[in-house]
Amino acid sequence: MNAYFEQLMQCKDPSIAHGAKVVVGMSGGVDSSVAAWILKQQGYEVIGLFMKNWEDDDDSEYCSTRQDWIDVVSVADLIGIDVEAVNFANEYKDRVFADFLREYSAGRTPNPDVLCNAEIKFKAFLDHAMHLGAAAIATGHYARVRRNDTGVQLLKALDLTKDQSYFLHRLNQAQLSKVLFPLGEIPKTLVRQIAQDIGLPNAKKKDSTGICFIGERPFREFLGTYLPTKPGVMQTPDGQSLGEHIGLAFYTIGQRKGIGIGGSQDSTGDAWYVAGKDMERNVLIVVQGHDHPLLQSATLKAQDTSWIAGTIPLINKNYAAKTRYRQADAACLLSANDQQIDDGKFQLHFEEKQWAITPGQSAVLYDGDICLGGGIIASI
């Protein structure tokens, strides 16, 4: 324990006074549990908060809410903090899930975790914590904040293999000024080691994957309970019909599995991929081969922008960007998108073509380790 305790103490945020009340979002997972323990060791008055954001079919085989709550209570008891549960299911449906369904209905592929962070975890949760008299909130996200005379910056985590700044890019100055990320300065391997060393009951619990309200259930099956199917034709770019799709909402750009095209249509034997959607004709465009030109793009147009600093980054400047999570940074040039960038739109020009840029996903801009913000991809 002593080997890394000093390191953890050096990561303490000096802007939050010793003994101040910090409310930690606890999910029942290892990351948020260790985050709560670290804050307790750093001398804060820590309160755990378990957020219930989904109620529909939460008694199904795919929902782990009950077990997660049991894990939160067990961890809180071990590390000696109070914990409470709060229900944000109505807020989640109104602010996140409704948008999720609208986007899929329009043929786009949204990232609800991005909106959940902005609207629930760092808005509804933050408001609740402030009513409890908290000086700050904390989560188990892998990211960092840096405070200076001009405001607060969002930085990548030191462990780049776990960095989650992509999901946090829509946070603003007011939100970030009240946030602590205890895991931003340490690697995931150390988090697991701490969990085992202090005897957390969930030390070996697997990390959660996928969208929070879907869990491990089949995605198409889940979406089908909320959106109607609307079958149409699958075509190649030159108009050759290859079969029928079940509805454009059920496919995403770059998708390979589950398209339903049996065998290859030419001598290459390459796999088929979704390359586009013709919403007016209800046609799914498919191509053969991972490197097909229709899956490659050197530009994208984005809208609904959100800049962490509250100001627009310099235009016609070189940055790096991610068009999906776990993608390597891609060098690009930021420019205005037809109109002024302050109209909420921008365009990126990449040095190298990017694969399967997907409308509805987020294009997130970086200047080194600094996450500047981004927007929702509208088109290529």
Image (cartoon, grey):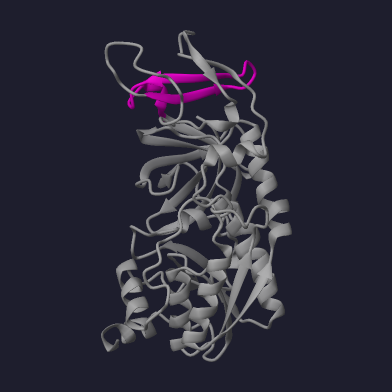
Position in image of residue 274 (x %, y %): 46, 26
Along the viewing direction, whichever of 240 and 334 lies nearer the viewer: 240
Instruction: Determine whether, in the image, residue 6 is placed left or right of residue 133.
Output: left
Q: Quadrant of the N terminus?
A: bottom left
- Quadrant for residue 228, please give it: top right
Please report the residue visible at 67 percent of the width from the left and 53 percent of the height from the top.
56
Please state which of residues 32 and 327 is positioned toward the viewer in this rendering: 32
Apparent side of residue 156 relative to residue 375 in the rendered image (left or right) = left
Residue 92 location, quadrant? bottom right
Q: Residue 68, position in %: x, y? A: 53, 68
Taking the magenta stretch, the answer to whether it contains residue 347 is no
Q: Is 130 placed above or below 280 here?
A: below
Which range of residues does the magenta coloring cover?
272-297
Left or right of 201 on screen, residue 69: right
Tell me where residue 312 appears, x and y as whole percent.
Answer: 56, 51
- Report the side of 238 relative to 162 (left or right): right
What residue sits 41% from the left and 54% below the top?
367
Residue at left 46%, top 26%? 259
